[in-house]
């Protein structure tokens, strides 16, 4: 199978000493991948006596954090 040479993978911006610019690029990248809520809200943790729905939401949040 041949790969399409027109498809570009987004590159993670490397810190070049200009924090404000780098932070803006990182925020844009994380927002485009829909990971920014993990920065603002954090990972959901299910309590010990949580129901199945809450445990599934916590597991999904943890998986998204690992990405």
Image: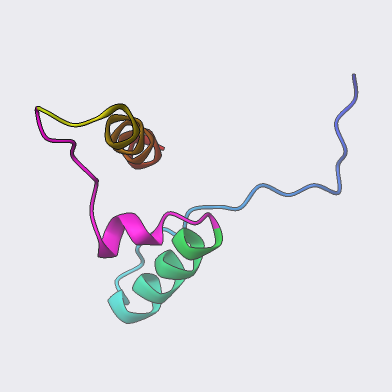
Residue situated furthest top in the rendering: 1
Q: Is residue 44 left or right of residue 4?
A: left
Q: Is residue 53 magenta?
A: no
The residue at the point 18 percent across, 36 percent down is 46
Of residues 40 and 52, which is closer to you in this image?
52
Residue situated furthest left in the rendering: 48
Q: Is residue 37 magenta?
A: yes
The residue at the point 36 percent across, 67 percent down is 16
Residue 33, how many percent across, how many down?
53, 54
Task: Provide the major secondary structure of the magenta segment.
Answer: loop
Residue situated furthest bottom in the rendering: 20
Specify the quadrant that holds the N terminus.
Answer: top right
Specify the quadrant that holds the C terminus.
Answer: top left
Of residues 43 and 31, which is closer to you in this image?
43
Of residues 13 and 53, which is closer to you in this image?
53
Q: Which residues are magenta?
A: 33-48
The relative height of residue 61 versus residue 18 in the rendered view (above or below) is above
Q: Is residue 62 left or right of residue 2?
A: left
Quarter of the image where one finds residue 64: top left
The relative height of residue 25 versus residue 51 in the rendered view (above or below) is below
Residue 48, how many percent across, how many down?
9, 28
Q: How is the image coloured?
A: rainbow
Residue 31, how many percent across, how many down?
48, 64
Residue 2, how many percent across, how many down?
90, 25
Quarter of the image where one finds residue 60: top left
Q: Is residue 37 left or right of residue 46?
A: right
The residue at the point 39 percent across, 79 percent down is 21
Q: How many marks?
A: 0
Quarter of the image where one finds residue 14: bottom left
């Amino acid at each position: 199978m041949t790969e399409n040479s027109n498809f570009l993978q987004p590159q993670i911006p490397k810190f070049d000493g200009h924090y404000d610019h780098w932070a803006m690029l990182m925020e844009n990248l994380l927002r485009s991948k829909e990971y920014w809520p993990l920065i603002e809200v954090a990972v959901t943790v299910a309590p010990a006596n949580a129901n199945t729905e809450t445990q599934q939401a916590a597991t999904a949040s943890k998986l998204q954090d690992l990405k």
